[in-house]
Image (cartoon, rainbow, N blue to C red):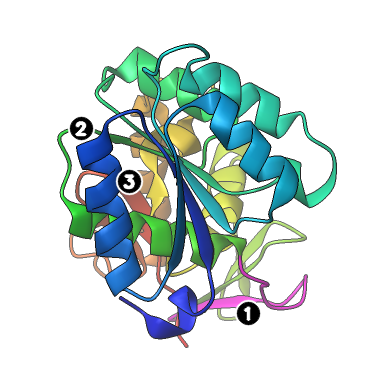
Amino acid sequence: MNAGLSDRRHLLVIDDDDRIRSLIREYLARGGFRVSVAADAAAARKLVEQLSFDLLVLDVMMPGEDGFSFAKWLRGRPGETGRTPMLILTARGQPDDRITGLSIGADDYLAKPFEPAELALRIEAILRRAAPRAAAGERIQLGRCSFDPVRGELWRGDAPVRLTEGETQLLRQLAGAANAPVDRFELARASAEAAGRAVDIQVTRLRRKIEDDPKNPRYLQTVRGIGYMLAPDT
């Protein structure tokens, strides 16, 4: 794991399964994270009220309060606590469940059974998105193209490239998480079609405008099993 991201990061794992809690704690601790655990939402609430966490890994099906209810409670908290990044990890992996989790404020949604390595990569991606970014208004370079997230303007050299409102919004979302994968369902929340087909269409159109070879994209990449990622020039 990326030592720069994991250095001193404090995670809270909330799951009623002792085996899964131990597995996640041991794997992430080996990656350099500080990891606290809770067996249910009640214990997690006490920890969140006492400590500051960089990210929460949250199960849904637990005795007592379920994970969706806890997530709503967390997002209702004031200040930084209410904005704590959150990844839902659950056996409820149907599209409707994913949409519910993301719509109430989860940053990512991973279904069980899962690979610990994928969980770690998704955590790193969320933390990258949450990290401070370049100054607002700075253009993002995409080969011969550049994008201004504030103005919502795409340029190829000195010539403006026309974008639809949906394409502009999608490119802004991806630019805000540059070099980190963004879940397809998270992108779909900003579109009129929650299933994500509108996102796929917009990605195809954007590639035609940005990429030299749209069939082999360099900048607007597909991340298999997750969604899409914008990889600008460094």
Q: Which residues are magenta?
A: 131-143
Label 3, residues with CA under 10 Å away: few <14, some 14-19, many ≥20: some
N-terminal of the pair, mark 2 or mark 3, is: 2
The image quadrant where one finds the N terminus is: bottom left
**Residue highlighted by disc 3:** 227
SS for callout 1? loop
Quadrant position of residue 231: bottom left
Q: Is residue 183 above or below residue 68?
A: below
Q: Is residue 106 above or below residue 99?
A: below
Q: Nearer the viewer, residue 205 or 113?
A: 113
The amino acid type, in three-letter code, at marker 2 is Lys
SS for callout 3? strand
Label 2, residues with CA under 10 Å away: few <14, some 14-19, many ≥20: few
**Residue highlighted by disc 1:** 158
**Residue highlighted by disc 2:** 112
The amino acid type, in three-letter code, at marker 3 is Gly
The amino acid type, in three-letter code, at marker 1 is Asp
N-terminal of the pair, mark 3 or mark 1, is: 1
From the viewer's perspective, is 74 left or right of 143? right
Does residue 162 show up?
A: no
- CA gap between label 2 and label 3 equals 18 Å
